[in-house]
Amino acid sequence: MTYFLIFLAVMVAAAAALYVVGLNKSAADAPIYEDALAAPVANLPPVLLPGTPMPADVDRLRFSLGLRGYRMDQVDEVLDRLRDELAGKNLRIAELEALVAGTHDADAMDTATIKGMAPETTSGPESHER
């Protein structure tokens, strides 16, 4: 019988505690179920690349760890490939810019020839034949 009275006293104390906690809860603290299907708010800072990413930026890129995150070997493989492709594209852009700069120099030379300022050549009739 004493165990029953102790159990009953614990249950009454628990009910009283829940009632007091429930009184302190305001309407603003009540959960809003209208946005239950909305996208969750991110609580971690985003992982961002600079406006013009360079291959070294990909090497410095780090992701947050999660309970069920991505496989690191797959992410590393993709990032390595992305870094290599960016480096290749930067090299190709540099080659094309050098080619365009060389073309502009050749155009300037042709313009000088048209205006009568012949480039330095050997004198003689052989230099004018093509």
Image: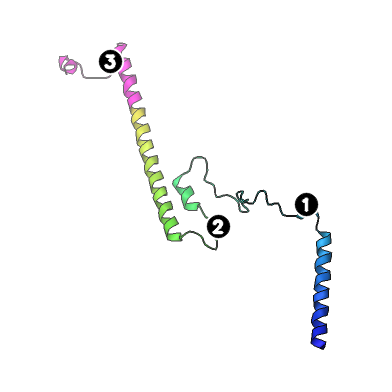
| Marks 2/3: CA–CA distance | 65 Å
Q: Residues within 10 Å of mark 2 (few under 14, many from 20)?
A: few
**Where's residue 26, x and y in %?**
81, 55
- For the residues bearing labels 3 and 1, Cβ distance under 8 angstroms: no
Residue occupying the point 47% across, 52% down: 59
The first of marks 3 and 1 along the sequence is 1
Q: Of the numbered discs in the image, which one, if any, rests on residue 90?
A: none
Residue occupying the point 78% across, 52% down: 28
**Where's residue 22, x and y in %?**
81, 62
| Marks 1/2: CA–CA distance | 33 Å
Residue holding disc 3: 118
Q: Residues within 10 Å of mark 1 (few under 14, many from 20)?
A: few
Q: Is residue 67 above or below residue 88?
A: below
**Where's residue 8, x and y in %?**
81, 79
Q: Is residue 121 magenta?
A: yes
Type of amino acid at the residue the image marks with label 1: Ala
Q: Is residue 73 above or below residue 95?
A: below
Q: Of the numbered discs in the image, which one, if any, rests on residue 28?
A: 1
**Where's residue 130, x and y in %?**
16, 18
Residue occupying the point 55% across, 63% down: 67
| Marks 3/1: CA–CA distance | 86 Å
Q: For marks 3 and 1, give the one nearer the viewer.
A: 1
Q: Of the numbered discs in the image, which one, if any, rests on residue 64?
A: 2
Type of amino acid at the residue the image marks with label 3: Ala
Q: Is residue 65 above or below residue 36?
A: below
